[in-house]
Image: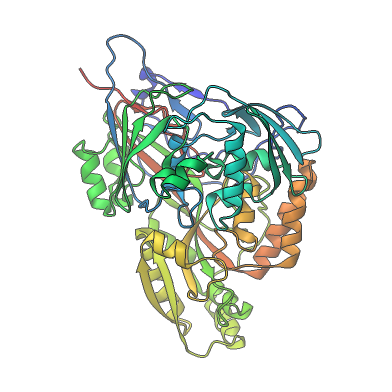
Amino acid sequence: MKRIRRITAILLMLTLCFAIAACGGGGGTTDTENPTNSGETPSGGNTPAPPGSGVTLSPGDVIEAPEGDDVKFAELIDISIEISVSILDPHAPGASGAGTGNIYYCVYDKLVINAGEGVYEPELATSWVSDDLQTWTFNLRNDVYFHNGDKFTAQDVVDTIESAKSTPGTYGFNTWRVVDTATAINENTVQIVLNSVNADFLFLTSLPGGAIINKAAREADPIEGAWIGTGAFYVSDFVSGDSVTLTRNDNYWGTAPITKTLYFHYVPEMTARTIMMQNGESHMCTSISNDDMHLFVDDPDNYTIYAFVGNTIFSLYFNLNDPITGDLNFRKAVAHALNRPDITLVAAGEWAEPASDGTFWGSSTEFRNNNIPMLEYDPVLAKEYLEASIYNGEELEIISALVINNAMAEVMQEQLAQIGIKTKLFPTDAPTLTSTATYGNEQTQLISWVAAFNLSAATVRNMFYPVGGDNRSSYNNPLVNDLLDKAPTVADPEERGAIYRQIQEIFAEDVPTLRIFSRVFTLVCAKGLGGILVSPDQTHDFRGIFLVLDD
């Protein structure tokens, strides 16, 4: 299991240097009782530490709650977020992304928890067994109730899987699409048979898309019924595109949360997020302006910061359904026309790492191929490829969302103009972009957006495979599809790793997407706040969050 460092009050008084660290994929072998997801620890390259000298933590660092009768905790914690949440439903299109994933962890439970390094721990399942990595039997807890009082049983797992499989392009579909049949053996036992052998199945069930839903509640109320889970918090208020209020579930079967209310609210303006943190209106912020980070980094007496190179890659997608952007020569022209360090500096400042190789893969995702050369900035070569393409002076559209992606699009527009490519910008919001730039769409051409990888290589199926929820290039290579189908059936991690590295090579040759940079993500926390389980895939666990009040 991943080592967890206990951060004490004494340690918080020290000034630490930045430790920008990425968590690795798992290692070990799969057995038949509580099997693990085998793999190797990837290498994402060296990352320079951002400026500053404040108290800075990395994924794996946990601030534990102090004990004692005299310790007082805040009943409400205010969390400002940079990505709006428009839909709360793991089985609804457009309801994906880091923002919803964090909330899903609080509201819903899953069969298992990913404890890191290929180790999985029980959540709704108490134990599991598979002799062939295709037929799985899960024994379930018998003391779990949904927020509406319904008792959780094996039939709820079956209902969840059937619902998810009927909703392509959703969180749930991406998790459960590999299932052939699911049968409730009895109230506390479910048997799941997959379409084929799948060494990544436990990892898939541990993702937010593995959330167990309540069928009866959803049928009674398609909107609010979708919010009913078995989690540590329930949704007490939701204003689409603005805020989500979660209230502690006092009937929770597991460890009771310390905090009574979590208030997630969307604050689009970076300056506003800084001010709200400084005046105490917000207790935590998931993103602060690069220009303002020094205000918090250099004030360790009042703030604690998590900093890490995330698995979220800021990228340019080509819609392969469009004749122009579907032309490989055109895509190579664009690749050689872009000066990625310059784009990175303008869009994210010093809190980012420009792409230094040609692989499209998370920095901490297992089986990363670090030996793929990048299509370097070369305007002369870019013009040669453009001349060989079908481009004939047409104006192309770059769709983008969020401040950083919008800034990235603006710089790319200027650089593409230098080799003769005309573009227009379409800045929008995240829900509009994710619902528009879907697999098979013919509306988009160039997409300035992010790819959110997980620690497991299984995450790439959602990005590379046809109908994948995050396949915004509409990429469909039969050879890659076959390899993606084969990889989960291979139990040996070395052999499976070779398959995934080959996939990366083919994907790089096809150039459906360009990695521009990886961002150094930060969580800025007020003094006394702790209990967060931070992950480099940007889906954090806030169930144990607390805020110690000053006397």
Question: Residue 322: x and y, percent?
Answer: 55, 79
Q: Residue furthest bottom?
A: 392
Residue 472 horizontal side relative to residue 497, left or right: left
Q: Is residue 23 above or below residue 486?
A: above
Compare residues 39 and 162 and report the one nearer the observer. Answer: 162
Question: Residue 108: x and y, percent?
Answer: 48, 36
The image quadrant of residue 388 is bottom right
The image quadrant of residue 328 is bottom right
Q: Is residue 177 above or below residue 414?
A: above
Question: Residue 442: x and y, percent?
Answer: 52, 76
Number of numbered discs visible in the structure rendering: 0
Q: Is residue 326 above or below residue 355?
A: below
Q: Is residue 24 visible?
A: no
Q: Residue at x 68, y 53 (%)?
A: 369
Q: Residue at x 54, y 39 (%)?
A: 212
Q: Residue furthest top?
A: 69
Q: Is residue 270 visible?
A: yes
Q: Quadrant of the N terminus?
A: top right
Residue 306 horizontal side relative to residue 261, left or right: right
Residue 509 horizontal side relative to residue 410, left or right: right
Question: Residue 278: x and y, percent?
Answer: 21, 39
Compare residues 403 and 158 and report the one nearer the observer. Answer: 158
Compare residues 331 and 232 and report the one nearer the observer. Answer: 232
For the rendered model, the colour scheme is rainbow
Q: Quadrant of the C terminus?
A: top left
